[in-house]
Amino acid sequence: MKKIEDLNMEGKKVLIRCDFNVPIKNGRIIDDTRIKESLKTIHYCIDHHAKIILFSHLGRIKEEEDLKKNTLLPVSKRLSKLLDKKVIFIEETRGKKLEKAIEELQEGEIILVQNTRYEDLDGKKESNNDEELGKYWASLGDLFINDAFGTIHRSHASNVGIASHIESATGFLVEKELNVLSSLNSCEKPFIVILGGAKINDKIGVIEKLVTKADYILIGGGMAFTFLQSEGYNVGASIVDYDRIDFCTKILKKYSSKILLPVDVNVTTEYNNDSLNKVKEITEIAENEMGLDIGDRTIEIYQNYLKDAKTVLWNGPLGVYEFEKYKNGTKKIMKFLVDHNIRTILGGGDIVAAASLMKMKDKVYHASTGGGATLEYLEEKKLPGLEIIK
Ligand code: ADP
Ligand code: MG
């Protein structure tokens, strides 16, 4: 697979698919991590005298109203500030204005094209990898770099489409993400996986793959209750995926000493931050109670396993971290990992968001910029954005 350093980009028009899909509220960028993570690739292209044309999606575009709030204009301004350099923002995804700007572009100069998903308004052309659109964008450049790890598991016109037509390579961010994930195959042991999140259904493939590689899997979050139910506990009103009980029974039987389940949980009767809550043993959950976080005894037991870990991979929060009352498990375990300097990799949109909220994202070894992509990589699925470059 070609890497950015394999390209001869001197004087060439280089199209770069970045991941500038940052959270924006009222026109203001709340977290610019993804923009910062793209700088290394852009700087490299500037230093190598390329003419740079950047693409990215932002949010989802379903109707006319989505256009304005998903403009890349704020990104263009932030990027310009971070680079300390002019960024020419083109407010359209195709047409004369864009073509003329590219024609006039000088070496080391940068164009940012409007949100690629503006093309979704008319027949989902970007998201469905419309043949004509990918070909058109490819015709605007000489070389293509895919540096958007967050969409590498998708087949879109702005990644797979463009890469189908011109010489292509991966960028530094994609390389970094892949290196971290692939290092898990031969990582220092004990290797412990922490798995939480809402539904077990999304994570079956990941569990099946990781259980063979990890020394322990510590389970929390909503998915714990399908496991507990399969063990015969009464989990009350907690979320259970009844279609997956069989899966849980089987995997627990096969890997009984590897998979750990909570022994106590923080329960309440309503899914909000206001209802009365208390920590209960898992044998004592009442019919109308739902578990929204792991309890203190579980936290302690999990920390006891984690204290010897050399590598930790964490996907999915251990509780409903969006509510103040139920972020305890996620927060205490995260702090423990940070305080003990344990090499921790966070993969998953929500676990990275939780780390960011708890001000620990920059203290862990690696926080991935791609949730879905990380999961599909761990499931050993083929990633279309990479396959096409290969
Ligand atoms: P990630 O994005 O890290 O892969 P998921 O998307 O699988 O994680 O899960 C995140 C969601 O799981 C959060 O919205 C959180 O509120 C929810 N969650 C965590 N614990 C529970 C629980 N006990 N009951 C219901 N939902 C939960
Ligand atoms: Mg999520």
Image (cartoon, rainbow, N blue to C red):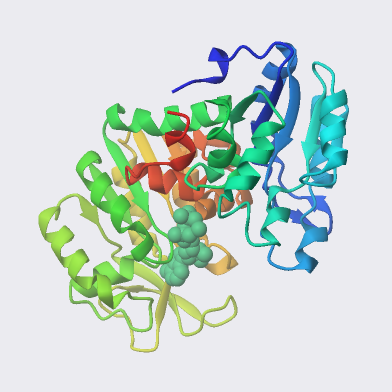
Q: What residue sits 59% from the left and 36% below the top?
A: 162
Left/right placement of residue 322 relative to residue 264 reads: right
Q: Position of residue 193 (x, y in %)?
A: 33, 45
**Quadrant of image for the N terminus:** top left
Q: What residue sits 51% from the left and 47% below the top?
A: 155
Q: Position of residue 147 (x, y in %)?
A: 59, 32
> Looking at the image, can residue 318 be seen?
no
Q: What residue sits 82% from the left and 22% below the top?
A: 109
User: How many numbered badges does the structure rendering display?
Assistant: 0
Q: In this orientation, which residue lies closer to the viewer: 168 or 133?
A: 133
Q: Position of residue 19 (x, y in %)?
A: 64, 41
**Quadrant of image for the C terminus:** top left
Left/right placement of residue 359 relative to residue 110 reads: left
Q: Quadrant of residue 102?
A: top right
Please, which residue is most extreme toward the left here? Answer: 254
Left/right placement of residue 145 relative to residue 296 reads: right
Q: Quadrant of residue 144?
A: top right
Q: In this orientation, which residue lies closer to the viewer: 116 or 347?
A: 116
